[in-house]
Image (cartoon, helix red, strand yellow):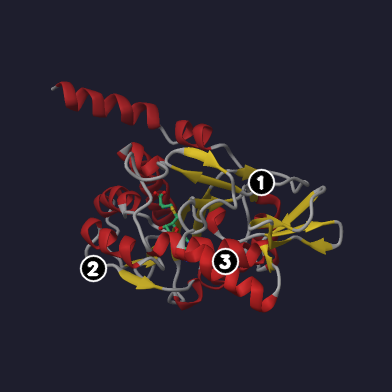
Amino acid sequence: MTPLERALRERIAAEGPISVEAFMQACNDYYYATRDPLGARGDFTTAPETSQMFGEMIGAALADCWKRAGAPTDAIYVELGPGRGTLAADALRVMRSAGFAAEVHFVETSPVLREMQKASVPDVHWHERIDDLPAKPLLLVANEFLDALPIRQHVGAVERRISVAAGGLAFDRDGEILETSPARDQAVSSIATCLAAKGGAALFIDYGHERSAPGDTLQAVRDHRFSPVLADPGEQDLTSHVDFEAVVKAARDAGASATPLVSQGEWLIRLGIKARAQALSRAIRA
Ligand code: SAH
């Protein structure tokens, strides 16, 4: 039994069944605090770890927003859940060459990942919580961050919980599931409030759906494979698909405007990733 499973069983024995939200929060807090989950030797790989072009395209898009806004000197680069800091390093290289010289702020809870981020991006300012960010114009990116925030699941009007049954952790009910994520709504709302007051742009990149719909999207990944979600708590990555209709609503309710969604592939092609790939392969051959 994992150390976290022992702690969760004690909690359930003392308090009764725990919500999916509390479970996901406890698992991911433990998981990210204790390891670097990325790459071939980790549990999953992300786009910035696959190619430098991903961060470069994001840097180009943010630099373009910044220039069109008149290159405000108080704007800051912000990243939520920056992993190893690879995306930031690639994006900032492009932004610096476009004249952006401002501060870099990361929202990151994991001490292990903060160490790696320090190596990729020196002079970064860290924050535990989004609400601790300075009130300045933001050039913000969050790749595979929203999917790691806890969700609630409901079956009918009842919140789905996890209890101990037949010696193992088990869901207390099944049926058609509706998911909500107050933590995600709160994160988006906080960023959108700052954008509405101070200006800037935020880019949220994630797996998800354009319209809210019923369905169980909670998933666990370990060693590059899907795994049962209740297995080995704290030792595998728990995520859910992002409900972008809810994200857009949270942003608009807080006074920001939201663009239509676009698939990652289409967005990268529109930004010119093919030309960048050709330039890189020419540079490699030369
Ligand atoms: N963006 C990176 C890493 C994605 S993994 C990439 O694309 O490679 C998720 C990241 O979010 C990790 O850095 C993790 O430590 C961070 N994270 C997860 N939950 C968080 C929370 N509640 N607050 C701040 N950071 C969190």
| Distance CA(mark 2)–CA(mark 1) | 38 Å
At 70% from the left and 66% from the top, the residue drawn is 253
Helix, strand or loop at label 3? It is helix
Q: Which residue is mark 2?
A: 123
Q: Residue 86's spot in the image, x, y percent?
A: 31, 50
48 w.r.t. 19: above or below: above
Helix, strand or loop at label 2? It is loop
Q: Which residue is mark 3?
A: 187
Residue sitting farthest toward the right: 156
263 w.r.t. 107: above or below: above
Residue 112 occupies quadrant: bottom left
Please name which of the two marks, 3 or 1, marks the residue nearer to the observer.
Answer: 1
Q: Residue 230's spot in the image, x, y percent?
A: 59, 53
Please tell me which residue lies in front, 127 or 254. 127
Q: Which residue is mark 1?
A: 217
Q: How many marks?
A: 3
Residue 26 occupies quadrant: bottom right
At 35% from the left and 57% from the top, the residue drawn is 35
Q: Residue 131's spot in the image, x, y percent?
A: 51, 76
Q: Is residue 177 left or right of residue 168?
A: right
